[in-house]
Image (cartoon, rainbow, N blue to C red):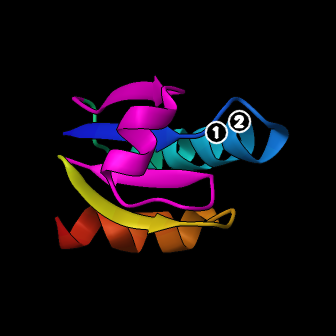
Amino acid sequence: MKIEILGPGCPRCKALEANARQAASELGIADAEFEKVTDMGRIVGYGVMSTPGIVVDGILKGSGRLFPVEEIKALLQKG
């Protein structure tokens, strides 16, 4: 599973990455690969107009706010 965190590296982006890592850990997803995406061209390519954003296996799951751990767990379980 590949999880991309979209954003310029702001505190909310870093917090989203931490929450995503915690969610994957709590779900026992040992093979989760994380990537920070700071390139605005790639970010806009996903249709994101407001960061941070989270992409799972190439599919945008949400953007524009800091998602809590429980919500990220639900996103990861949906596939």
Q: Residues within 10 Å of mark 1 (few under 14, many from 20)?
A: some
Of the 4 image quadrants, the one containing the C terminus is: bottom left
Is residue 27 something that shows in the picture? no
* Identity, as a three-letter code, of the amino acid under mark 1: Ala
Is residue 60 something that shows in the picture? yes
Mark 1 element type: helix
Q: Residue at x 46, y 29 (%)?
A: 37
Read off the magenta span. Answer: 31-57
Q: Position of residue 72 (x, y in %)?
A: 47, 64
Viewer-nearest residue: 4 or 68: 4
CB atoms at circles 1 and 2 under 8 Å apart?
yes
Q: Position of residue 34 (x, y in %)?
A: 38, 28
Q: Residues within 10 Å of mark 2 (few under 14, many from 20)?
A: some
Mark 2 element type: helix
Q: Is residue 49 above or below residue 52?
A: below
Q: Quadrant of residue 13?
A: top right
- Report the side of 38 relative to 78 (left or right): right
The residue tagged 2 is 14
Q: Is residue 32 above or below residue 66?
A: above
User: Mark 1, mark 2: which one is toward the viewer?
Assistant: 2
Q: Position of residue 44 (x, y in %)?
A: 42, 49
On whether residue 51 falls in the magenta region, the answer is yes
Q: Is residue 9 above or below residue 53?
A: above
| Tag shown at residue 60 | none
Q: CA distance from mark 1 to mark 2?
A: 6 Å
How many marks the image carries: the answer is 2
Q: Residue at x 63, y 48 (%)?
A: 16
- Report the side of 51 relative to 32 (left or right): right
